[in-house]
Each structure stands twice: as structure tokens, then as C-alpha cells.
Image (tube, rainbow, N blue to C red):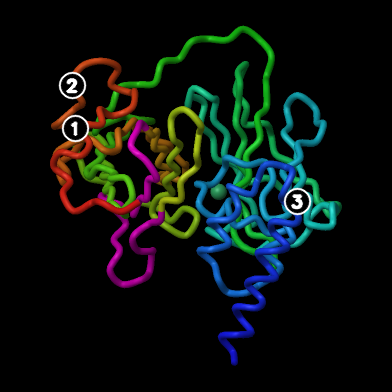
Amino acid sequence: MRTVTRLAGFAVGLAAVFGTTYGIGRVVDRAPVVEGRHDGDAAHATGEHDETTDRLPGGLLVSDRGHTLQPVDAPADEFAFRIAGPDGQPVTRYDVAHDKQMHLIVARRDLSGFRHVHPELAPDGTWRVDTPLAGAGQWRAFADFTPTGGEPLTLGVDVTVPGELTERPLPAPSTSTTVDGYTVTLAGSPQPGRTSPLTLTVSRGGQPVTDLEPYLGAYGHLVALRRGDLAYLHVHPDGAPGDGRTRPGPAVTFLAEVPSAGSYRLYLDFRHGGAVHTAEFTVVAGTPAAGTPAAEAPPTGGDPSGPAPTGGADHGTPGHGHN
Ligand SMILES: [Cu+2]
């Protein structure tokens, strides 16, 4: 009986999908999604909740699940925006995630200029912050937030800052970098389609830093952006301050999920000496020699920051067949 009811609901849902999408060229896009979710919920056919976006990395859409990122006119030294909710009105209630209601990340399309800042919310739903857009360029701004009662979202929007553009090639892959007098090394290599540990180790003056300060509820905050489309990847810290096993450095481990082979830029924010520092790395996912640091086996030939050679990507990663 229950099965019959569910099937009936499913059929109605399918009919509604074809009824509403035929003629706008989305039948092919939507039908497999409906088949994969035979829970009989006819609401899927309304178009209000587009399941196709569930598979996308964050930050690629300016509007998702009824929420839209809307930049607001602001003085040149300020960046302002709103999140319009399903009713079209600015959202004013947000949950706290990683210590904040709103995380604003910006980077140029060439992956330079990364900043991670925390705007202030005005009662009318406008978020404002001293502009993090440091100079001319094609910028991508990401709003990472959870509307109260909703799911976590990362929306992205392009912002152009006029002026003279400077060519900034993507730095070559590396497992060590320096920032503000700190040396940060990277161990681990992201593998497409599975969770990979990435461990970043901080030292200064040749000495390990063992008193990292909590920042956003962790000893580090890692953002990864994909070269080419700036897909924004969730990278979760493995452990938290005060959990009885996570130490305040020198190593901080993250669990990264990259959706594809290719080049990514990693941005590690960590706090020490009362200031936040950002260490950046270029990594190439899908290179051979799984389990060894990428720098020990750099891709051979051609542009090191381009897509990984497909022949090499399969070599050395047996058993990784699903996607
Ligand atoms: Cu943040």
C-alpha cells in the first residue's frame, strides 16, 4: 500500500516535471535527477528546489535554493551586499558557523588577492565591510553562510574593479611557502572523488610553532579554489581546540574533497602573535604517486598549473573507479 502510494506520487511528480520543463530544454537535465530520488515528493517538480545543484561545488552560483547574493552600491572603500531570500526580501537571520554568521571570501579570477573577512550585518539585512578588493581586476566574491532554518550555502558573484590589470600567472605547485616570517609546509595530495588529508605545519625561525591561537573555532581555516572556474571547496579541519587530542601546532590537518583533477589554490588562515596570517599553495589534484607529497613528484612537461595529464592521473591510483 505504501509502495503503491509512493509510486503514484512519483508518477505525478514525473508528470509535473515533464509538464513544467518541456519546451525550455531541461527535460534531459532533470529526468535523471528525478529517477535518482524516488521519494515521491512532488515538490521536486516545482522548480523551487533544484536538486541538480546539489552536486555542484560551492560558489559557482549567484543564486541557489532560493537565496541570491546581491552586491549593493557602496563607497569605494566599502563592500556591501545582501542575501535575498525565497520571498525576495533580504535575509536578516543567520546561524553561526565557524564562529561567524557570514564569511566573505574574495579572490581575483587569476586566484590572486585572496582575502577572508567578516562583514557586519545591519538591521535591514545589508552586510558591510571595509573593502577586501585590493586593486583592479576581475574579482569573485563568495558569501559563505547558513540562513536560519536553512542549509549552508556558498554563493558567488563577479565584481569588477576598474583600472590597469597586471598579469599574475598562477605560482607553480609547491609544498613550502613563507608568510609574515613564518614557514608553512604542506604534506598530502588531494585526490579527486575522495577525502584526502592535508597537513600544514607552521614554523618560525626554524622552530616549530606550538602555540597557534584558535581562529574561527580551529587552529587554522583552509579554503581551496579551483583554477578555471573558482569552485569553492569545503575543507574541514580534523579536530578542534579543546577536544583533548588536537594540539595547537605545529601541524594542522584538514580533510579536503576535490571534485576533479586539476589545479587548486589553497589558502590557509592561521592565527599567531595576535594576528591572522594567510599561507598560499598551488596543488595539482590527480597527479601520480598517491600518498607522497606532490612536490616530490611534480607533473612533467608543459604548464605545471594546467590540468593534470589524464594518463598519469590514473596511474598509481587503483581502485578509484566511481565518481
Ligand atoms: Cu570567515
The residue furthest bottom is 1
Question: In this picture, which residue range is highlighted in magenta?
Answer: 236-263
Q: Amino acid at mark 1?
A: Gly
Determine whether, in the image, residue 181 is placed left or right of residue 47. Answer: left
Q: Residue at x 28, y 29 (%)?
A: 308
Asked whether disc 3 touches disc 1, contact meaning CB atoms under 8 Å apart, the reply is no
Which tag, 2 or 3, sits closer to the chain's start?
Answer: 3
Q: Position of residue 296 (x, y in %)?
A: 14, 32
- From the viewer's perspective, is the residue at label 3 or at label 1 nearer? 1
Asked whether disc 2 touches disc 3, contact meaning CB atoms under 8 Å apart, the reply is no
Q: Amino acid at mark 3?
A: Leu
Separation (CA) of disc 1 from disc 2: 10 Å
Q: Which residue is mark 2?
A: 300
Asked whether disc 1 touches disc 2, contact meaning CB atoms under 8 Å apart, the reply is yes
The residue furthest top is 164
Q: Residue at x 42, y 57 (%)?
A: 218
Q: Which mark is residue 121?
A: 3
Which tag, 1 or 2, sits closer to the chain's start?
Answer: 2
